[in-house]
Amino acid sequence: MRAFSRFLAAAVLLVAPSAFAHEYKVGDIKIGHPWTRATPPSARVGGGYLNLTNHGQTEDRLVGGSSLASGRVEIHTMEVTDGVMKMRALPDGLALPPGETVKLEPGGYHLMLIDLKAPIREGAKIPVTLRFEHAGTVDVELAAGALGAPAMEHGDHGAQHGHGVDGQASAGGDEHAIEHVMKSIWDSKESPLDVAPVVVAGDYALAGWVQAERGGRALLRRHGHEWRIVLCSGDDLKSASNLVKAGLPQPEAEALSGRLADAEAKLDPKVVARFSLFEGMVRMDEQGNHGSGHGKKH
């Protein structure tokens, strides 16, 4: 469970990209489509993503940055080693080989805006100054998409969150938004995250997930047009009584429990068995902090 539980503290911080397309240039470096995500009210960290194309004949390097919106900006990478996702800073910066494009995106290289001075709001333009070893500095704006919105390709203009009838997830709506919330944090080419089933009752949802040989269940809650992870566990999230203890109203707890049982009955039993491998409980608070609990593989 380490790949999933280590990054729960960042779960509500890294959830959905911007849809706006814009480009900048400094020296031989072209900066394509910088974007970020809206953050919860008390979040202290945000992410920054963009494409860097070196049109020169020699290697350059992204060596740092700064922003009026945060205390500092760092260059980070996320890697999967032995099935475990790890995030680390790149103090020497990021190499930009000549004639190549380096993408800063979820699950790989990215900017970290640390000690945010205010929450990032959907639709905001977050100023960031990028510093290159040879090309110099350039001011860019990160266009902020909604927290929980799915990834947009170049030229797209946003994602809508649909609400299903009787609290069920509608196609392209809640179910897809929840899937993107989870995948944008933990999914990678080396260790893909599968999210299914997803069931919704009112403003609450349960989602099963599998990553390699690991698995578990997540409880989410709707806040406006956003979905936020409340806690993650295994079999503890199957029962209505435990959901009530977690703070759900009785009707929603019973509806979720029943819908989850029905949905999981249609899955391969081997997949459902992986949901039980998550031991304990990892809880999120409104500030996006990692509460007590643990998750590990049997």
Image (tube, grey):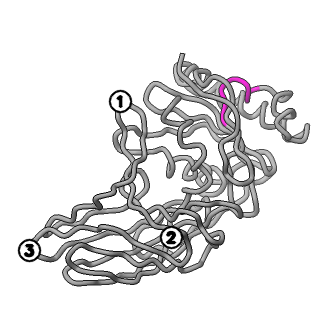
User: Mark 2, mark 3: which one is toward the viewer?
Assistant: 3
Q: Work out whether residue 256 or residue 135 is closer to the camera in this orientation and state it.
A: 135
Give the image location of residue 153, x and y in percent: 42, 67
Q: CA distance from mark 3 to mark 1?
A: 36 Å
Q: Which residue is mark 2?
A: 18
Q: Helix, strand or loop at disc 3?
A: loop
Does the magenta-highlighted stretch encompass residue 235? yes
Left or right of 167 in this view: 274: left
Residues packed near mark 3 inside 10 Å, few (<14), some (14 to 19) or many (20 plus): few
Q: Quadrant of residue 96?
A: bottom left
Q: Quadrant of residue 239?
A: top right
Circles 3 and 1, Cβ within 8 Å, touching? The answer is no
Circles 2 and 3, Cβ within 8 Å, touching? The answer is no
Q: Which mark is residue 272?
A: none
Q: Amino acid at mark 3?
A: Gln
User: Mark 2, mark 1: which one is toward the viewer?
Assistant: 1
Q: Which residue is mark 1?
A: 82
Left or right of 187 in this view: 52: left
Q: From the image, which quarter does the C terminus lie in?
A: top right
Give the image location of residue 100, x and y in percent: 18, 66
Left or right of 9 in this view: 205: right
Q: Which residue is mark 3?
A: 57
Q: Examine the rendered structure and indicate whether residue 184 appears above or below residue 282.
A: below
User: What are the residue bounds of the magenta stretch?
Assistant: 232-238
